[in-house]
Amino acid sequence: MAYVLDSNGLSLAGHLSVPNRVGISGTAGLVLCHGFPTGSTQETENDRSYYDFADLIAKSLGWFVLAFTYRGCGSSEGEFSLQGWLDDTINAAMELNKNPQVNSVWLAGFGTGGALAITAASLCAEVSGVAAISAPSDFHDWVKDPDQLLQYSRSVGAISAPDFPQNKESWIAEIDLVRPVDAAGEIPQKPLLVVHGASDQVVPSFDARVIADAHGNADLRIIDGGTHRLRFDPRASAIIIGWLDQAHRLQAKEMPSSQYYTTEEK
């Protein structure tokens, strides 16, 4: 169903998939994060692939799944900034955590969304685990040529206001502060799935290995022949759903029952 997420006063378009039934002890919740647009940002929202994937996960696992559109994309308000997108990710996780039927919050993201999911997990104790797909280990390439990034962001509509950013230096500095590889090293206790295509021409699969190594306990999956567009690869979808189910069940067994909320307790 359609959902509007408030993120620092901005209204972000979204879709909330609801399980058919929820037991008395609740169920898990997942925030689904898309990547940086490769064409018009309208495609991010009009292409229902993420919403359809959210529905599939909700049906397969019996989870709540919130798929939202980052600021500057689709019909979401605001302009693109990496810090802003990180805020959106955290706010989405906290929003799902407010649901009294959700007993644990997980993040899954593609491309930039995957990198931000890892970073958000390092900043939010409420996040139980992360699945990062085709995620870059850092954003140094963006920092090296900020003018090209700014131009590209305008060309795809992620930035539409002519006077944004008002402080270009701060906008660039925020990008350099987001380091997924460092964030991965800060959450060795949280389950992490790293999925990458062996033939990814946008983000090399080396980035996936760097992230997994930094974490120390990550489940690394390199898909033979897979490209950067793993959202449309059924092998990746199967891996993500299977891993989420297994990781959640394992964590539930290891965690004291007092830490898993019931619908009455949360």
Image (spheres, rainbow, N blue to C red):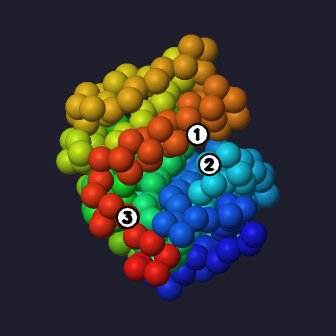
Instruction: Report the quarter where the N terminus lies.
Output: bottom right
Pointer 1 or 3: first along the chain: 1
Q: Is residue 39 left or right of residue 121?
A: right
Which of label 2 and label 3 is nearer to you? 3
Q: Is residue 38 above or below residue 99?
A: above
| Of the image marks 2 and 1, the number of the one nearer the N terminus | 2
Q: Which mark is residue 241?
A: 1
Report crowding for label 3: few under 14, some 14 to 19, many 20 or more residues within 10 A (C-alpha). Answer: some
Tell me the quarter of the picture where residue 185 sits. top left
Question: Residue beneath label 3, please?
Answer: 260
The residue lying furthest to the bottom in this view is 9
Residue under the image location 34 percent in, 24 percent down: 209
Residue 151 in the image: x percent, y percent? Answer: 55, 53
Amino acid residing under circle 1 = Ile
Q: Secondary structure at mark 2?
A: helix
Residue depicted at x 37% and y 64%: 260
Q: Is residue 83 left or right of residue 52?
A: left
How far, Cα to Cα, is label 2 from label 1? 8 Å
Tag nearer the camera, 1 or 3: 3
Residue 244's spot in the image, x, y percent? 50, 43
Q: Is residue 209 above or below residue 182?
A: above
Return the residue nearer the eye: 115 or 19.
19
**Residue at the spot 45% in from the left edge and 65% down from the top edge:** 103
**To which residue does mark 2 refer?**
61
Amino acid type at circle 3 is Tyr
The residue drawn where x is 56% and y is 14% is 224
Q: Relative to 47, is 126 on the left or the right?
A: left
Amino acid type at image mark 2:
Leu
Q: Residues within 10 Å of mark 1 (few under 14, many from 20)?
A: some
Give the secondary structure at mark 1. Answer: helix
How far apart are the two marked residues, 2 and 3, measured between alpha carbons? 17 Å
Image location (x, y in percent) of residue 161: 58, 74
